[in-house]
Amino acid sequence: MPSTRWISAPAGKVRRFAARLARRAEPLPRLPFAVALAVAAVVLAVSVEWEPRPYDDIAEVTELPSALDPEIDFSGGAQVEFEILEYGFGTVEDELGAARVIVGAVIRNPFDTAIISPGGLDITVVKDDGVESTLEKFYPNPIPAGTTMRLGFVITAPTEGVPLERLRLSTSDPSFLAPDPEGLSEAERAYAVVPPMPDVELLSVEPLLSPEGYRLQYRVVSDQAQGILLTVLFRDAEGRLLGGLPAGEDPFSFELGSAGWRTVEEGETLQELDLHAAWIPEGADLDSVEIGPRAMYMG
């Protein structure tokens, strides 16, 4: 049945208009009772008897089923866990000068035979009573067999007044191994068996004057042309993680799914990434900056 929510909108506008008239008329001399009663009757009649368009004039939209997705159901595989090797938090500023908390992590698929469809990662805060409260959840991309991946994430939940030392990162929700490729069709196998992540090597970090910051030059070696999603991790001089970012022109636009995606050709590709100074957490050692893939797309 088509939606009729719009029918109440004109009547509501009339009622609100009448209310405004009443408020404005309060300071004025009172109308004779008969005149006021007549005005009220007209307003009531309009608000109640407003004639909506007939149903014949309303186009009913039918939602069509989407095409079958050839992607396999990972939940048919064994339930497993991926590993969080290390993580850390830091504070940076976005383009508007607002403080943003970032998290960097290194995760690993410990299985050498199958890709993992990972569950969520929970960012929690430890309260004064020692109880952990979930601040935000995000989901890594599928992890190829035996692969270690870097993750950079910008927390969108309010973090004002939250000490970084009280933040934690932990796994949540089930993770699944891809089913045995031997029992899959050719189309399904394309999702269950993926090539290794491309190799990414940071070559240099050079200062920039405009915008103030640094330019990262890096090399990508890939077995095929593909899109890759990159992450930048920051460490201090002792090697402790201070957070990470999607490696894109605007690392704070990751909610739109665009930050960090870059296209590389088969073989060797040389690329650059500019980091604004405000995007680098305090205490980061530029000689310890890392860049690496967190996902790939072979469209």
Image (cartoon, rainbow, N blue to C red):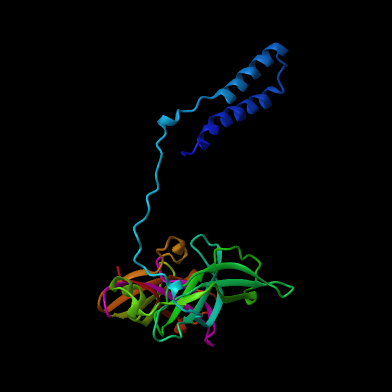
Q: Residue furthest right?
A: 129
| Residue 283 visible in image | no
Q: Nearer the viewer, residue 20 or 197?
A: 197
Q: Is residue 198 left or right of residue 49?
A: left
Looking at the image, how many numbered discs can be counted on the residues?
0
Please state the horizontal and vertical placement of residue 219, each as a whole percent of the image.
32, 80
In the rendered view, would you say 47 is above or below 83? above
* Magenta residues, start to end: 223-249
Q: Quadrant of residue 88?
A: bottom right
**Where 97 sits versus 102, above or below?**
above
Q: Residue at x 57, y 22 (%)?
A: 46
Q: What is the x, y in percent for residue 210?
A: 40, 67
Q: Position of residue 251 (x, y in %)?
A: 45, 67
Q: Nearer the viewer, residue 65 or 155?
A: 65
| Viewer can see residue 131 | yes
* Residue 271 falls left or right of residue 79: left
